[in-house]
Image (cartoon, coloured by chain):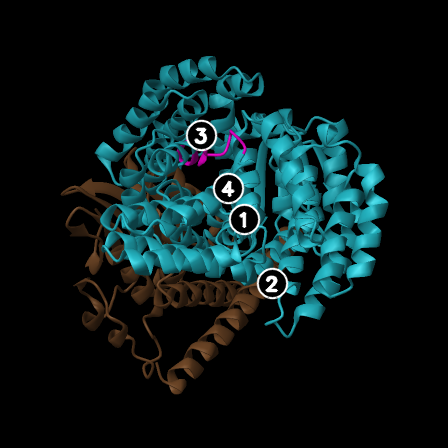
Amino acid sequence: MSDENKQNIDFSMVLASAVHDMKNSLGMLLNSLDELRTEYQDSLGTSKRFNTLHYEAERMHNDLVQLLGIYRLGENNLSAHIDEHFVPDFLNEHLARHTPLLEGLGIQYQVASEDISGFFDEDLLTGVLNNTINNAIRYTRTLIRLTAREEDGYLVIGVEDDGQGYPESMQHSGTLSFKSLDFKSGSTSLGLFFASSVAKLHTEGDRTGFIRLRNGGSLGGGVFEIWLP
Amino acid sequence: MTDSSQTAGTNLFAKLSFLVVDDFENFRLSMRQMLRSCGADRIELVAHATPAIQYCTYNHVDVVLCDYNLGEGKNGQHVLEELRHKKLLKRSSLFLMVTAETSKEMVMGAREYQPDSYLTKPINRAMLEKRLGALLLQRSALLPIYRELDRENLPEAITLCLQMLPKQPRYKTWLMKTLGDLYFQLGDLSHALKTYDDVLAQREISWARLGRCRVLLANHQYDEAVEGLKLLIEKHPDYMEAYDLLAEGLEKQGKPARAQKVLEQAARHSPNALLRQRHLAELAGANQDMDTAYQAWKQTVILGTYSIHDSSRHYLALAQTLTDLSDDPDNDTASDRADEALEVLGRMEKRFAEEPELKLRGDLVRCRVHAGQGRMNEASQLLEQLKPALGEADNLQPEMGLEYARTLFRLGQGAEAKVLLGNLAERFASDPAILQKIENLLDEPVGFRQKLKARALNRDGIQAFESGDLTGAAEAFRQALAIVPDHAALNLNLVQVLVKEYEHQPQRREHLQECQRLLQRLANLPEQHRQHRRYKALLRKIEGLTS
């Protein structure tokens, strides 16, 4: 290994620990925002500026969580610890994190899940869901729906909205490579790359997880799906 | 939007007592606010570990919500360990670790006690209600099992788990995990194995794979266990418990050097588990890798500061390792190591002032430190002062006796040391662990570098013998014996080589004379020594050849 390479590794570690710090700071900030919202429900609850503040802080927090995940992925230090979970409970618990903001923005939310258990790594899926819900909050008009079903031997967890849907270029299914990250356009698809990586960490026999983006669904907007074997 | 858990959850919250531990006042207050709005009424707030433990000592708590990071002093894991270890918190009470971490790093790092669940910051009311509500529902469903666990009635707990499995599919993971563990604790290995196999038949699940390997190890199926653990680590390089278990398996296979490598790897990933550092230190010490042993003991001592696993034994082992390192003319940091050894002993005596024998043990180590630094007068004077306090050999406890013998050897009083060890071997004839230590000391009462050299020469000798080079073998064993003349196995190895040479060339009577001299050295070999039967057999053989 060359010296130049070593330098790189050190730098990414510095970055990772800085990101870790920032993530924890944002966690505190989000906590304060939640408290403010509870305390000043009447004046702040539906304030557009306050909700933007909350939304953007959530988005940054998510990005940083994903960044750390991707860092550990690169260090070959991230693996899926798959366990059996009751899916409706899981979805309800994770939607709960977003309900204050959803209510503040006047967006309705639903969980439509079969009463099924599924096999997945809870921590990794949490990261994916948080990000996807956040994304849906940005693009939906009035409604967000979390879905779960079994199809072809896969557990399919979906996030649907009633917005404009994904642009043509983004609709696809399969796995994303690191190269697909485009730092020039406004959206880096970091979240999709992370989701795709998490899906790939879920394997069973010769089957591997993947993500699928399409338009339509029950609400007619964007549909994000993660298929887990 | 289904809200069934909310109504059920509210009732559950109201009946229970909560303890919130967080060093930030804001967090404590907001957590109380959130719990209240979920329907909780009995909520105690504390800022640090000590008052948390104190509160649990005198009050019944159903749910502890403890932040991992509590500033200076004990952290959340220490609190958990102390509460569970001292049984200050019932099994039926939940311990929830609150962290800002989103990965399993800490789950995977801990070895003994794990929280019932993790709550990841930031936490808001809706989330807390859902998450905690679900956990409380689970707790009340499983309460009969928790009660039997608190009564330590494991068979009854197993029966209840089995009854509940078909009725509570939602808690299947918990039930199967608990079942496997309970069967294992009871020593019912075949049922434990079956439990894990049932889980694995459905899906490759890492905890079940680990459990299965643990059962295989207990069942002496070392090869299969080691294979399974290697595969598990390949798939999950972040699963620390698998490393710990793999190291145990490799040790059982008689591969201590590889076991050490595995633990070193695990300690790099996750350096804060005291028990893992201690295991590494012990292994490295046995492998005579004193530098690694030193680092690991040092880490063990540091991690002990706030841990219930802290022990004077760790300080003593650190001081002994430093003493070995300091007694080495090739080492230019030798005198620093000597000073550090003395400093560690001083700290130990202060920290464990209530252990009466400790000062004596420490002083025996001090004698060796002085001797290693060439202060022979100081060393002998101190030892003479200690002798009355040490008393009759018949009354010495094994650890103290071994320490004493080690010091006697170092101060050139080998004859006295051998008598002492003979006495110990007789009194503890039924304890293989102590006998092993006695043998090691009798065989190799020298510094670690010499030990390593002698061991390498012994290996060379065996290799030469196996390839038929008798002269080379004899030469290697002779060189090794020049370093450790009393080493039983080595002496017998050389006797065996010489007998074989004599059988090829009967004119060389001098070989037999050398054998007699070698066996003479072992005349006082304790009967309990593992080489004793081999010694007797070769003695008879030589007597037959020389008569």
Callout 4: chain: B
Span shown in magenta: B526-535
Residue type beneath disc 4: Gln
Task: Check the residue under mark 3 and report the chain it is in.
Answer: B
Position of the C terminus of chain B by quadrant: top left
Is residue A199 placed above or below B1 in the rendered structure? below
Report how far apart the C-alphas of labels 4 and 2 lie in the structure: 80 Å
The residue nearer to you, when weighing B4 against B333, is: B333
Discs 1, 3 touching: Cβ within 8 Å: no
Q: Which mark is residue B282?
A: 1
Within 10 Å of disc 3 (Cα), the crowding (few <14, some 14-19, many 20+) is: few
Q: Is residue B101 magenta?
A: no
Instruction: Tell me if mark 2 has few (under 14), some (14-19) or many (20+) residues whose alpha carbon lies within 10 angstroms of its own.
Output: some
The residue that appears at 32% across and 38% down in the rendered structure is: B222
Give the mark nearest the N terminus, 4 or 1.
1
Q: Residue at x 52, y 44 (%)?
A: B521
Q: CA distance from mark 2 to mark 1?
A: 45 Å
Q: Nearer the viewer, mark 4 or mark 2?
A: 4
Residue A44 image position (x, y, % from top left): 61, 59
Distance in Å between CA atoms under marks 4 and 1: 34 Å
Q: Could you tell me which quadrant the N terminus of chain B lies in?
A: top left
Chain B image colour: cyan
Could you say whether the residue bearing mark 4 is in a helix, strand or loop?
helix
| Disc marking residue B186 | none
Which residue is identified by label 4? B520
Mark 3 sits on what residue? B4
Labels 2 and 1 touching (C-beta < 8 A): no
Read off the residue under disc 2: A29
